[in-house]
Every structure is written in C-alpha cells, then in structure tokens.
Amino acid sequence: MPVFDRHFWLIVVSGATLGLLGVLLAVWGNPDNSGICVSCFVENSAGALGLHDNPRMQYIRPELIGFVFGAILSSRLLGEFRSRGGSAVMPRFFSGLFLIVGCAVFIGCPIKLFLRLTAGDLTALVGLAGLIIGVWFGIRSLAAGVHLGRSEKQRDGSGLWVPALFLLLLVLVLVKPAFVRFSVTGSAALHAPALISLAAGLFLGFLAQRSRFCVTASIRDFLLMGRRAPLIWGLFAFFIVATATSVASGGFNFGYYGQPGSHHDVFWSLLGMALVGWLSVIIGGCPFRQLIKAGEGDSDAGMVVLGMLVGGGVVQSWEIAATAAGVNSFGKVAVLVGIAFVIILTLFYRERGTVPGSAT
Amino acid sequence: MLFNTSVFRTFICLLIAVSLLVVLSGCDSVQNRPVMRIGYMNCNSEAETVARFTPLTAYLSEKLNIDFEVIPVDTQDFEERFTAGEFEFGHSNSLLYIMLKEHQQMQLIATEKRGQYGARTAGTIISRKGSGITRIEHLKGKRMLFGPQLAPSGYLAQYDLMLQAGFDPEMDLDYYAIPHGSFKHEKVVYGVYFGKFDVAAAPALDLELMTREGRIFADDFNIIAQSEVIPYCTFGAARNVPADLVRAFRKVLLEITPETTVQFNGETIKVLDSAWISGFEQLSDSDYDPIRRMARNANMPPYQEF
Amino acid sequence: MIRDLFDKFLLLGLVAVAVAIALVLGGFFGQDDALITQKRNPAVERAMQEKARSAFLLETYQPVEHLMLSDRHAEALLKLQEFDKTFPGEPHTMILRGSILVTQGVLSEGLAQYAAAVKINGDYVDEKSSLHRRDEINQLVESAVPAIRKSLQVASTPTLEKSLRDAYYLQSRLAGGCE
C-alpha cells in the first residue's frame, strides 16, 4: 500500500477533480464524453489558428491555456519554475506529433479514454488495453537503456516561450481577431463558457503541477510498483468520481454501440493508444502532462506541445483522424509510421555501453 | 560439335517430354472440371445478354471451378427450357422465379441489385405532364402501353395497381398494347412521351436510368401510381443442384464488389460494371410474397385459373 | 540582467517595439482592412455562410420536398436523379433520397443514403444547424436497429450487417463526439 502522506492525498484530490471537471465541462457545453480531451482540444485550437480547414473543428480551447497557466502559477508560487531543456529536441517535436496521431485514431487522449469508460462506453476498453500495452513497451524500452538525454538547466527565460505562446492564444480568445476561426457548427461549436473553461483549466493545471498527476505515469507506476504507487490511486479517484458524476448528470450510457465519438475498428484503437502509451513513457508524460511541464519551464515538453499543435493540424488536413465511421487508410498508415518512429527512436536512443550515460 | 553430343540430345528429349507432361496435365485438369449451364433471360437481345453476363459467368467458373456456359433464353421460353433441363441455373425476373419455384421447386440463390432500390424495383403508371391524367380514375377510356406480360414491374405490378383501385384494364381502358421487338420498357415510356399513348406501365428502374442518362426529364411525366417494391432479377438453381453448390454460388455472388475483376479475352474486366449491376443481395423466399399476391390478384401465372 | 549600456539599449529597443505594436494595432498608422474587424466579424461571417448554404439547399430542393409532402415519392426520386447530375455528391440529395426510400420500405438502401449524407455533412445531426434532421434520423435509428437485429437472428446476410453498421454509425453521430 502507498504511504498516506500529504502528497498522496494531493494526488487523489487531483485525480478526483480531473474526473469531476472532466464530466462537468461536458455538462456545461463541451462535446459529450469530451469534457477534457487534450488531443481534441489541440485539433480544435490548431484549426482556429488556420493549421487545418475542417470548419467543424475550429476553436481555441481555453482549457489548454488554463492548464499551462495553472502550472506556471503553481510552479512560480512554490519556486519550481525552472527553465530547462535541450535534450533530443527534434525527436520530442515529432513525438508530440505522433502522440496526436495515436489519439486521433482512437478519437481521444488518455484522459478522454477514461472519461469515455466512466460514461459507459465499452469501445474505450480496447483503447485501455492498447494504452497499457504501450506503457509496458515503454517500460521495457527504459529498462533496455532508452534515454533521451538529461534535460539541462537553461538560461533564464527560455522556459517562458511556450507559456508566451499560450498567452498569445489567450489574447486571441479574448480579442477574436478576424484571422482566428471559430466554428459555428460541429463539435468545436460545442463549448462551455470561455471563462468557466479557463478557470477549470487553471485549477486543474495548478493541481496537476503540484501532484505531478499523469494518466500514463499512473499506469507505468502501477506496472512497476503495484498498489504502492500513489499515482494509480489518483487514477482510481478519477475513475470513481467521473463515473459517479456521469451517472448523476445522466450522461452514463452503458454499451458498445451508439457512443459519442467512438468507432468499432478495435485493432486500430488498440494500436493508436499503444503508440500513445509507448511514446508517453519515453518522453516522460501523456499529452496533459506535457502541457503541465511546459508551464513549469520545461522547453523539452514545450517542443512536444508544439509538435502536438502541428499534429493537430496534420491529422485533420491529411484526413488521418478517425471518425465514427472508423479509421481510414491514411489513419492506419499514420499509426504504423508512428510505431516505426517510436521503434527507431528506441533503437537510436538506447544506451548500449556499460558506463551509465555512455552512448554507442 | 555441341549439337552432336549425346548429352545435348538427351537434354532436348527430356525437355520435350517434360513440356508434354506439363501441357497434358493442364489439359487433364481442365477436362475434369464439371460443366454446368446458366440460363440468362434475354432482356432485349441475345447479343446483349451474352455481352453482359459472360464476364460474370467466367468469374463464377473461376471461383467455383466449374465450367459454366452462358445460355441466352427468351422470356417466353424460359420455363419450358428450364423444365427440359437445358440449364441448371437460371437468371430471370422475379415473376419467373416464382413460377419456377411453384412448378419446379427452383432454389433461390440471390437477387440482383440495380438502381436506387437496390435488390428491389417497382412498377409505375405514367402519363405525360399536362395531359390532365393524374389519377387512376382518369385512365377510363384511355389508351395504355404495357411492357412484356411476364415483366413483374412492366405489366404485373401496374395491372395489380389498377385492379386494387377498382379499375379493370380489360374493360375500362379504351385500348392497350404491348410494343413488339426489344427495348419494350423504353418504348412504353417514349410512347407516352411522344403522345402516341395516353398512359404507360413503366418500370421505376427504367425511368430512373432514362432520367439519369438525360433521355427524359422528371418534369415530363406524371407518375400516377407506383406499386409496392418487389424483388428484382433473381438467380436460382434447379432442385437437383446440391445444396452445397447453391450455398457456394450464393457466397461468390454476395462477395462480389464493384472492384472485383475477371480476366476475359485478354482484358481485365469489372464483373459488376459489365453486367450493369451494382451487386447481389440475399433475400428470403417470403420477400417475393408481394409478387405472389399481385399474380393471384391479376390471375397471372403461376396462379392463373382458366 | 541589466549590466551595461548595451543592455539598456536593448531594453529601450524592446520598449520601442512594444509601443510600435500598440500604435499599429491602435490604428495610428492608418486603418486598413485587417484592423476593421467590426466589418468582418468572423463569427457573423461564418454564421452567414452557413445560413446562406442552408437557404440555398432548402430553396433549390424545395420542388423535391413539395413532391414528398404531396406523397409523390416516385416523382421526387426522379427529380433527385436530375439533382445527382447537377450537384454530384451533394449530401442533401442523399438525405432526401434516404428519407423517401425508408418511407417506401427500402430500409437498407435508405440507411445507406442517410449514413453517406451524414458522413459528408455532419450538419444533419447538428442541432445548431438549420439543416438538421436529428428527430427524423433518431426515429429511423430507434426503429431500424431492433428490426435489423431481429432479422439477423433469423439469417445473417451481408446486407443486413451493413445496414446495422450504418444504423450504429448514425446512432453514434447522434450521440455527439468530436467530429
């Protein structure tokens, strides 16, 4: 069993709050089962910025801005904001891109996976299996010596660029200049009031930075340490609170068919989430955690976030994203390319010498 | 000097022997394939029937390892020739299927899909726009063109429609005719279009195809009535065809997609395109009950009483 | 951070750039189209485009809808054939055809048309769109799914399986999601 200290309870509270707000944001206007979905939100935001032209997926999601700013606030208050980075910058960029590819093929990030499960969507079970498999491969890769390199302390300010980008996004949300696109129909037209989304994002970002909560890390730690891992209790809390909130709000619909934002191409759902799980372990966190770390001044995570933004544009423009009709050939190829990418990454970044830190 | 060596001579003999063996073994396997015949009901002409259905037949031969022959058959002769055992499989309209089912226990294989109704079709009664003929009651004393008598959507369905409306085509029409020759369904449409007849019995499929091809416009006609939808052209098998073969035949048909091709006369041909159809569907015998009801009501085969 | 004259010079330059940005956005150097946002409110433009498209479709297809309301479904289907030539691939043709086919009892072909239309244009299941047909599609799905499942229990055919997939797809789109 874990140590029931302050950090443990912080993790539980973070998970519970994520589950609660994840469901409530859907009740307040976000798409069904997508109260919080980092990949969908990134695709929407990319569309708003003109990175793709799907008219149904264009809206800068204030939640993303809130996550980053909440993390900045928390890290600054407690002296944890540190500009750092410089390790495997380009691989991290492409990792971010392929994280979105994997999520887009499943139709959801790991947070949305659990939100779908807690809403009774049985198609998410396959995604969960894929995520666990991917995390396991990630653990095996780390154990085999895969290491993207140590993040170095950087000069003051370098960790502020990605937060500055999100500040710009906030300005764009508030000012709404002509070049920013906003959907009037489709899923991006479904959103909670901007201030509520921002506030929820701030609160969650703050908590997540304090607790280091991360869905894939929870699974990773559970596979490594079992019930002693505190993070898995955060995930349990997420699951229980989200399920209860779903039932209470009338959004619980148990079944395999007719679920919002889901498809029945089980093999590709599994593969997409496996890609996400594997990559997340190697780069140190799921898409949500990357946003939080970017808010802490980690410019490596910032590169992942930039890759995610580009990925959000690519999956829509190149028709990689799956739909309720299933995964098309472009999506299948993209996931396979992603798998190839993570294998190559694993091969190139595997330390094979006996001296720790020495590369081949 | 090389050509004089005994080794070289032996080699050439061996080569010839092996080649002969290969050729003969190939012939042997072709000769061992059973031969069966598919009777295809002629819609317009033998030549058209053969051109349409030979690639499909070749595909069936390839998949089932049976040498199928294409036998074009006139509608009027279909039942007689099927009863005489001239072909084991039949492709005919759905009324003929019912007749053969009733009289010869024909086994239902699959129904052809064509047009927007898929494996179904319907019969309509049409008049020229502006003629003032918009209801069946207006048909009294009018001149009507029908399609062939054994056409379920070109004669039977419309005849039944009129009877259901309390209208007796034999007594209440001034005159009705059936065009001679081929392309009867199109002739009935043109007959009304050019004012030679007041109304016509037009299959919904033909109206659809002619509109799609721009030969007529939707606004040219009133569709006075349309029958309920009924199954379209049907593949069936004689009662003595083994059930396994019937199942296999059906499976092959149902699995054909628009991209399925066959090598035929040195060309790669899309099977469905060449047959002018969009696929096959498995219906049940009870799906043909509307035609049975129509046939009974209209005193048509196989239920006619004299 | 500010150590010498050069640093001060750089800081001054930064302030000057910030002031210049403010002046440009404030229109000090002249208003141009990019700044006159009130004439090109993107949300209003988008809404107008959507309304214009919907109005165009509803007006253009009005003869077909009139025939459907008069129960002249056969003529409506013929009219849709002509629209297929004028507007090939237009989902509005498909959805109207689907509606007629379902009315005439051709469920599998009708479902296929509905699913094809919604795949191309999700507005038909979007409450915010003036083209939406949520109630109609909902009713169709609610009646079709149990009927198809019942038929599948008797005999499983590829057509029935495809029809069920189409019905589930429509059900999923009605439920919402990120599309």
Image (cartoon, helix red, strand yellow):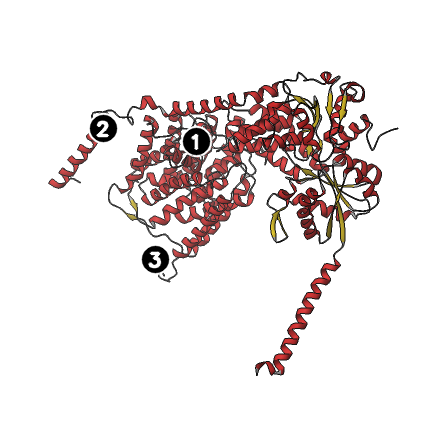
B167 sits left or right of C98 in the view: right
Residue identifier under label 3: A357
Q: Secondary structure at mark 1?
A: loop
A267 sits left or right of A346 in the view: right
Q: Is residue B293 above or below residue B130?
A: below
x, y percentage for residue C46? 41, 25
Residue at x-position 79% and y-position 30%: B292
Q: Label 2, label 3: how many angstroms apart (C-alpha)?
A: 52 Å
Q: Label 3: how many residues lie within 10 Å, few (<14), some (14-19) or many (20+)?
A: some
x, y percentage for residue A319? 46, 40
Residue identifier under label 2: C24
Q: Label 1, label 2: how many angstroms apart (C-alpha)?
A: 30 Å
Q: Secondary structure at mark 3?
A: loop
Residue identifier under label 1: A55
Q: Label 2: how many residues lie within 10 Å, few (<14), some (14-19) or many (20+)?
A: few
Q: Chain of mark 3?
A: A
- Lower sequence index among marks 3 and 1: 1
x, y percentage for residue A69? 33, 34
Q: Quadrant of the C terminus of chain B?
A: top right
Q: Chain of mark 2?
A: C
Residue in the foreground of this view, choosing between B57 and B237 = B57
Tell which residue pokes out farthest to the right in this image. Answer: B306
Residue at x-position 58% and y-position 19%: C66
Q: Are labels 2 and 3 on one chain?
A: no
Q: Is residue B181 above or below residue A222?
A: above
